Image (spheres, helix red, strand yellow):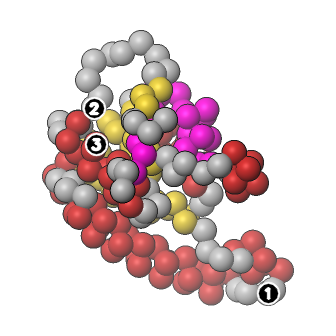
Amino acid sequence: SPCPVLVVKRQPQGEYKTVLAPTDFSEPARAALRACCTLLPQATLHVAHAFELPYDGLARYASVSRTAMSRYRREAHERLHATLIAFADAAGTRPAARVLRVDHGYAPTMIERWIESIGADLVVIAAHGRSELESTFLGSVSLHTVQAAPCDVLLMRAPAG
């Protein structure tokens, strides 16, 4: 759908208070975050990014030490956290009403964990509009989230043009 879609999973319990906004730092994700700030100004907004290091799994077989891998992850975490702060600021989130987190792991799995750990009642996520073929072979984080989330999910498309 070219317009936002709210997937309602359960009977409303009141206003959305705890919102998870996973991000990949894309323009559609920035637009989704801006819309969330406008639509839900009273909610606590958890802006989160999951990352995996390139060739992370292969590093074990290449005799890369645990110390080196920990250092690479820590450095990546620090860079991504600074990027997340700038991203959240540019999207208009209020620092007092947001929680920022960067975690190492597979994005769909991390989103499920974040939903559970914060007790999210809504996930606001960008839908990139891949073709069925791309989604089949590459996967779709937004599709996985709609299917797996126990809470409501707001799918946001990037603005046209």
Left or right: 33 in relation to 55: left
Residue 35 lies in what quarter of the image?
top left
N-term-proximal mark, 2 vs 3: 2
Q: Which mark is on residue 17?
A: 2
Residue at mark 1: 63
Considering the image in quadrants, where does the C terminus appear?
A: bottom left
76 magenta-colored: no
Q: Which picture quadrant has residue 61?
A: bottom right
Distance from the alpha carbon under mark 2 to that under mark 1: 46 Å
Magenta segment: 140-158
Secondary element at tag 3 = helix
Q: Position of residue 27 (x, y in %)?
A: 38, 61
Cα distance, mark 3 to mark 1?
44 Å
Q: Residue at x 57, y 55 (%)?
A: 107
Nearer mark to the viewer, of 2 and 1: 2
Say above or below: 24 vs 159.
Answer: below
42 vs 142, nearest the viewer: 142
Residue at the extreme front: 161
Question: If you read the primary sequence from the N terminus, does the residue marked by circle 2 or circle 1 appear first?
Answer: 2
